[in-house]
Image: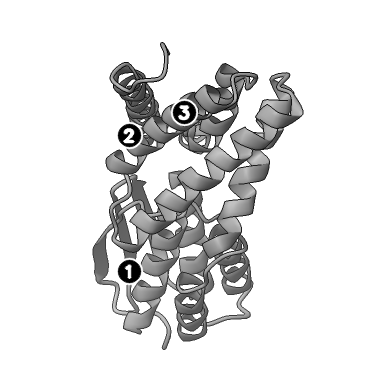
Amino acid sequence: MENASDASCMDALQLAGKIIMENGGETYRAEETINRMGRGFGLEQVDSFAVPSGLFISYKNEDGEPVTSVRRVRRETRNLTRVDEVNQVSRLAASGKLDCRQALARLREIECHPGSFAGMWCLPAAFLCAAGFALLFGADLLSIAAAGVVALLVQLMETFMARFRSRGMAASILGGLLTTMLPLLLSRVLPALQTELIVAGAVMPLVPGLAMTTAVQDTMRGDMVSGISHGVQAVLTACLIAGGALLAVEIMHFIPGGAV
C-alpha cells in the first residue's frame, strides 16, 4: 500500500484540517474531513481529535504501527471559500479519485487562494453590510450612507492591520472606537444624522456572529471544549468592541463642539 506509507498522507490530512479550522470551519467538520480523506487514501483506523488550537491525528501504517501527529492551529481569518474547496478535495479523495500526493498539491493551492472576497473586495462588502443594517434599523438615506462609509473606513483599518499581523484584540478595540467616534464627529457637522442608527449599522460587520454560531453548534453536538472556546471568543470580542465604543464616548467629552 504505497499511499499508507507515504509521509505526504499525513501532510495532506494535517493541511486539510488546518485550513478548515483557520478559516472559520467547525471542529467536527475538520475531524470528519480528516477521517474520510484518510480512509480514501487507504489508511487503517484513522482517527482525529480537533480543538480550536490544535489537531491530533493518528492511523496505522501498512506495518500495523500507529502513526500520530500534532498540529498547532492559529485562527487567522474567516474564508469560507477555502473551507468549501477543502470539502471538494475531501470528496474526491474519499471516492478514490485523488491520492495523497494529488490531494496535498491541491490543498497547498487552496491554502494560498485569496478567496472570493479577499483584498479590496472587503471594502464594498463592509459598506453594503453596514448600509443594509442601517436601513433595516430605520435610518434615513443620509444616515445609511454614513453608516456604510464608517464601516468602509473601519474595514480599511483592519485590512491595513492585517498586513502587519496586528489583528485580534487591537482590531476589535479600534473597530469599536472608530464605529462610535466617526458618527459622533459627523453628527457635529451634520446634526440631522441619526447617530445611534449609524453606530448600530456600522458595528454589525464587527459582530462575532460566526464564532457564536459555531459555539452553539459545537455545544449542541456535545463538543464542549470547542463550544466553550468559541463562546468565550465571541463574548470577549463583543466586550472589546463595546470597550472601544465606551472609550470613544469618553474621548468625545474632551473634544470641543458640544455634548455627546
Q: Position of residue 256 (x, y in %)?
A: 35, 20
Q: Which of disc 2 and disc 1 is earlier in sequence?
A: 1
| Residue designated by label 1 | 60
Q: Is residue 171 above or below residue 247?
A: below
* Residue lying farthest to the bottom in this orientation: 2
86 with respect to 69 (left or right) = right
Q: Residue furthest top?
A: 259
Quadrant of the rendered image containing residue 111: bottom left
Foreground: disc 1 or disc 2? 2
Q: Quadrant of residue 104?
A: bottom left
Asked whether residue 5 appears in the rendered view, the answer is no
Q: Dot 1 surroundings within 10 Å: few (below 14), some, or many (20 or more)?
A: some
- For numbered disc 3, what is the local secondary structure? helix
Q: Type of residue at label 1?
A: Lys
Q: CA distance from mark 3 to mark 1?
A: 63 Å
Residue positioned 32% across, 75% down in the render: 61
Q: Which corner quadrant of the image does residue 129 belong to?
A: top right
Q: Is residue 190 above or below residue 46?
A: above
Is 184 situated above or below 167? above
Please state which of residues 53 and 142 is positioned toward the viewer in this rendering. 142
Q: Badge 2 is on which residue?
A: 173
Q: Earlier in the sequence, mark 2 or mark 3?
A: 2
Q: Residue at x 25, y 64 (%)?
A: 68
Nearer-N-terminus badge (3/1): 1
Dot 1 lies on which element?
strand
Q: Answer whether labels 3 and 1 touch (C-beta < 8 Å).
A: no
